[in-house]
Amino acid sequence: MPLISFKKNHVSFEVAPGANLMKSLLEAGLPVASSCDGDGVCAKCKIQILEGAENLSAENDTEQFLKEKNNLAKNIRISCQTEVHGDVKVDASYW
Ligand code: FES
């Protein structure tokens, strides 16, 4: 089972392979910024990937558009558009 862990002092947790990153974080009780509720419009759900980027789904067209439009760094993922297939370590500026 893929493990999501954190740079800061949050408890790591396992998710089902292919789990949505944003939903997984919310279910674990971590706040994820959003004004479109995961519809791939706002880009506020961006999450920094510190380790395990290769264990995430490839960026879809929606994510590529949002990242380009918002000038987001390569290690930032739009969490509502991202699936978790292996261990990752993540961070967000507001955690
Ligand atoms: S929640 Fe709006 S783009 Fe992800």
Image: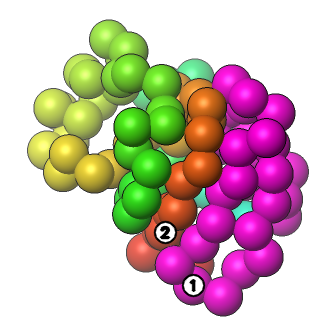
Left or right of 50? Residue 72 is left
| Label 2 residue SS | strand
The segment highlighted magenta reads 1-29
Q: Which of the 4 image quadrants contains residue 84?
A: top right
Residue furthest out toward the bottom:
9
Determine the residue positioned at 39% across, 63% down: 50
Q: Is mark 2 within 8 Å of ligand 1?
A: no
Could you tell which of marks 2 and 1 lies nearer the N-terminus?
1
Query: What residue does disc 1 label?
Result: 8
> Is 9 part of what is drawn in magenta?
yes
Where is residue 83? Give x, y as percent.
59, 29
Q: Which of the 4 image quadrants contains residue 61?
A: top left
| Label 1 residue SS | loop
**Frontmost residue, 48 versus 55:** 55
Residue 30 badge: none
In this rendering, the answer to whether 50 lies above or below 71 is below
Query: What residue does disc 2 label?
Result: 91
Left or right of 90? Residue 50 is left
Residue furthest out toward the top:
61
**Frontmost residue, 69 versus 92:** 92
In this rendering, the answer to whether 65 lies above or below 30 is above
Where is residue 6? Give x, y as percent.
59, 72
